[in-house]
Image: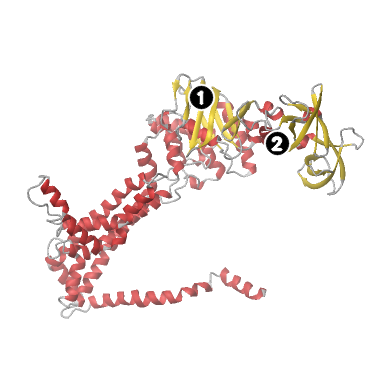
Amino acid sequence: MAQPAAWRHRMAERGVDWQLLLLGPATICVLGLFVYPFCYGVGLSLQPEGGDVLASYRRFFTDAYERDTIWTTLRLALPAALFNVLASVPIACRMRGRFRGRRALTTLLVIPITLGTVLTAEGLLNYFGPTGWFNRILLSTGIVDTPVRLTNNVTGVMLSLVITGFPFAFLLIGSYLAGIDPALERAAATLGAGGWQRFWRITLPLLAPGLATTFCLTFVLAFSVFPSAVLVGDPAGTTRVISIAAYHAAYEAYDYSLASAIAVIMGVIELIILAAVLGWRSLLYTGSTRGKG
Amino acid sequence: MSGDSQRFTRLRLEGVTRRFSGTAALSGVSLTIEQGEFIALLGPSGCGKSTALNCIAGLLPLSEGSIWLDDSRLDTLPPQRRGFGMVFQNYALFPHLSVRRNVAFGLQMRRLPRGEIRQRVDAALRLVRLADQADKLPGQLSGGQQQRVAIARAVVIEPSLVLMDEPLSNLDAKLRLEMRTEIRRLHQSLGLTTIYVTHDQEEALSLADRLVVLRAGRVQQVGGPEDLHTRPANPHVADFMGYRNLLPMVAGPRGGATVLVEGGGLRWHGTPVGDINPGQAVVAAARPEDVRITDPGDPSAVPAAVEVVEYQGREVAIEARCARGTLLHLRADRRYAPGCPVAVTVDPERLLVFPAGAGNGEEP
């Protein structure tokens, strides 16, 4: 009976763990369902119908209508992600500790996650639209003379991105905050630090790496925005985001090569932003957030 | 280090009460602490000692009562305006700041000039013998070193009062003894008024000038180490101060300074604490080291059988059972075999007799 255990131990000493073989099926799935299609897409983007290998990429970058989708998307995704992170911090900070109604409040803040983009868009159109309640209230109270345009433009998409992105940011930041030892702020208080100083000097530096990670996640969510850009945006003009450009290329112009090129460009832009944010994060203190090392 | 902030003569707690959702963790605690004193708040877990410390630090608001520093009311001030130094049980060092910046934090909050901060931080780090670790992060230090940083951080601001919340409970036994000496040395050299919370009676006895024993949120006894060690006020304090033998008995007639107590097959003379009347139910308390193995011919000797023997270096701890089943804890200078019959006794002045129920109700 001792033989197999000893053999396993010898293999473990050499860094061989046979239980890792259980990952096999999952690896095959990832290869088949993600890696292969990804490589296939990259290949497609390099096989345009006419011209040389990079012709699709050149077409995207030389056509201002296509190229501008990058800025259109960044202009939506960066502020939305930033807003979601920055708005979550004070709310999550206030929601620490135990108080009556905490669960109800958390539920209320998080519930938009369950709604889905289409339902949110529908609600936005009904509520913020030219004949929605919001405008009707403004009109009837005489604050405005003509309805405020809040849908079918950049504002509408931004509202949608905030409604669906905020709960993610809030939940993530809440759990990062919960990981920070509350004794640290108490210690800072006994040393003479007021509320702001405690936040700036203790909580924020310890929270910053978490903020960077949260920003990355909400940015990626916002950057691939498609449904809300179509439903509550202005998909032919001001909210023609990069995923709409890819969709048009693939399913209206049937130019799979261009569509794949746009998808690759999209991925590269996301990677650049993530690399920048994570590069900044690596400069921060990222160790333990407990008072005892 | 000489401070100008420690000019107070006494800290007064008046009827300090703190309730958590209806139940009182601290009820009506009144206490006066003179400048320069080392006070230990002592009690089992849940007795309210940490609550008391947090109330003094300002980290918990009071439910009732008030705290005064001489003539100025303290309990309405937020913690950052009280100017006390606090050492936390888990150290609570800022993990992202170097040792130097941890210690400098309180001085920076006081907006002192850079040069003075540097000077005082260096002095504080020398005091706790960590000058060579100044640029490390707390996570790179050992537990004992982290604890010394926490102490340096609390004393560098020259606080009028240092609060310590079980600062040694996370250290191993050897380090705990070393740090205990270190804290006593610091107190002797700086003379800072200190309130020290602990559940370890030995720690409290060795460090404090005065001990405050708490139980269920109430002060049981206040006194010097010798007072508490030899004259506990009630069975609870006795229990906490190492009187492991707490025997329910019945009082007999008094004879001079002593009283006869009987019960559980034992018949001993003891020293009454408080009013004891014949026939009254009492608790007789004795430390294991005061229960002796004696000659069977001794008139006060009680026969018992050795059950458990623990080797403890210079002596052995013994658990022996009397004929009627009463279990006695005692010490002996040599090993006895389990089952060995012995005769045990205790000197009348070492057996304290309390009225049963003393210390259970309101304060005497």
Chain letter of the residue carrying label 2? B
Identify the image quadrant of residue A39.
bottom left
Q: Which mark is residue A28?
A: none
Q: Residues within 10 Å of mark 2 (few under 14, many from 20)?
A: some
Residue lying at the far left in this picture: please name it. Answer: A145
Lateral position of residue B76 relative to residue A75, left or right? right
Lateral position of residue B294 relative to residue A78, left or right? right
In percent of width and height, residue A154 lies at 16, 57
Residue lying at the far bottom in this picture: please name it. Answer: A49
In percent of width and height, residue A6 lies at 63, 72
Identify the image quadrant of residue B219.
top right
Q: In percent of the image, x 69 and y 36: which residue is there? A: B239
Q: Nearer the viewer, residue A164 or A10?
A: A164
Q: Secondary structure at mark 1?
A: strand
Q: In the image, what residue type sits under mark 1?
A: Glu
Q: In percent of the image, x 31 and y 61: which residue is there? A: A114
Looking at the rendering, in which quadrant would you find the N terminus of chain A?
bottom right
| Residue pointed to by mark 1 | B14
| Residue pointed to by mark 2 | B242
State whether residue B214 appears in this view.
Answer: yes
In percent of width and height, residue A97 lies at 42, 45
Give the distance between the C-alpha atoms of the residues marked 1 and 2, in whole angstroms: 30 Å
Q: Residues within 10 Å of mark 1 (few under 14, many from 20)?
A: some
Q: In the image, what residue type sits under mark 2?
A: Gly
Is B191 placed above or below A5 here?
A: above
Of badges 1 and 2, the one in the foreground is 1
State whether residue B130 appears in this view.
Answer: no
